[in-house]
Image: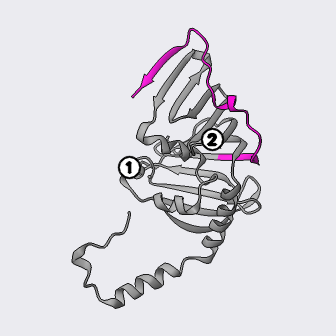
């Protein structure tokens, strides 16, 4: 579940002024289509409280050149009062698996085999938001972690979308993914599909449908009450 900063050293203080002029000009010539999409996302983020949707996800294995069996279920995402992520991803088919994230702790419960894993995300708790990238985060915050490019338009889930290509800036994030692609729905500024690309060519494709912005989600949704007899594993 899982993000290059430019800096000018003291030895570069004598770089010719013309170079600074070129750099400043290039920074102001950002693709206006990208600006438009980011402005729409910024607008959504100002009023964001919660999100729910039906989801489908499937893993592509490069060495086999094929997808595995798709998983489907329900996805819920919100923010706690302290700004931390609240997340529930409930896979209902082909098997049942429930992931919840609250207070920087992730719990994965598999009822069929009566097993649960608990992971204290610690310093990596921001990785929880990979599954909800583009939902409520300001473009400014995204740019702290990613270099963002506009890649045109393409339909996803039958709806016109703007495609954004994100490349991690720091080594910690790049260790998980080589890139992340977001399909932003033109009608509402919400991400309805994401592609989490790994370095070995594998990737996870996640699609949302019946998405709802700011629905009322009971606090209990993000709680995992594990029944007795569950094999509990704590992962450091």
Cβ atoms at labels 1 and 2 below 8 Å apart: no
Residue at the limit of the structure toward the front, as seen here:
81
165 relative to 124, above or below? below
* Mark in front: 1 vs 2: 1
Q: Identify the mark nearer the N-term, 1 or 2.
A: 2
Q: Identify the residue position indicated by label 2 in the image.
A: 57
Q: Name the residue at 44% across, 52% down.
A: 3
The disc placed on residue 172 is 1
Asked if residue 18 lies left or right of residue 56, the reply is left
Stretch of the chain drawn in magenta? 207-236
Q: Position of residue 105 (x, y in %)?
A: 51, 32
Q: Position of residue 81 (x, y in %)?
A: 61, 42
Q: How far apart, in angstroms, are the residues tagged by discs 1 and 2?
A: 24 Å
56 relative to 117, above or below? below
Q: Secondary structure at mark 2?
A: strand
Residue 2 visible, this orientation: no
Residue 189 visible, this orientation: yes
Q: Name the residue at 53% across, 81% down.
A: 29
Which quadrant of the view contains residue 40?
bottom right
The disc placed on residue 234 is none
Which quadrant of the view contains residue 51?
top right
Q: Quadrant of the C terminus?
A: top left
Asked if residue 57 lies left or right of residue 155, the reply is left
Q: Position of residue 24 (x, y in %)?
A: 44, 83
Q: Name the residue at 59% across, 9% down.
A: 228
């Amino acid at each position: 579940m899982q993000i290059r900063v430019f800096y000018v050293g003291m030895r570069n203080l004598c770089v010719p002024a013309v170079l600074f002029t070129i750099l400043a000009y290039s920074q102001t010539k950002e693709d206006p289509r990208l600006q438009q999409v980011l402005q729409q996302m910024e607008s959504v983020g100002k009023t964001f409280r919660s999100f729910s949707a039906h989801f489908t996800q499937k893993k592509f294995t490069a060495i086999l050149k094929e997808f595995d069996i798709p998983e489907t279920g329900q996805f819920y995402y919100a923010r706690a009062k302290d700004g931390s992520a609240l997340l529930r991803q409930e896979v209902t088919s082909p098997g049942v698996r429930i992931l919840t994230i609250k207070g920087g702790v992730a719990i994965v419960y598999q009822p069929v085999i009566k097993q649960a894993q608990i992971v204290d995300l610690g310093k990596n708790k921001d990785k929880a938001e990979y599954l909800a990238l583009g939902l409520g985060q300001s473009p400014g915050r995204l740019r702290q972690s990613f270099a963002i490019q506009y890649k045109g338009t393409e339909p996803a889930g039958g709806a016109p979308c703007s495609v954004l290509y994100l490349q991690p800036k720091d080594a910690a994030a790049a260790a998980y993914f080589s890139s992340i692609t977001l399909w932003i729905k033109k009608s509402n500024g919400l991400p309805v599909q994401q592609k989490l690309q790994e370095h070995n060519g594998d990737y996870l494709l996640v699609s949302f449908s019946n998405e709802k912005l700011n629905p009322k989600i009971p606090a209990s949704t993000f709680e995992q009450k594990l029944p007795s007899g569950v094999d509990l594993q704590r992962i450091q």
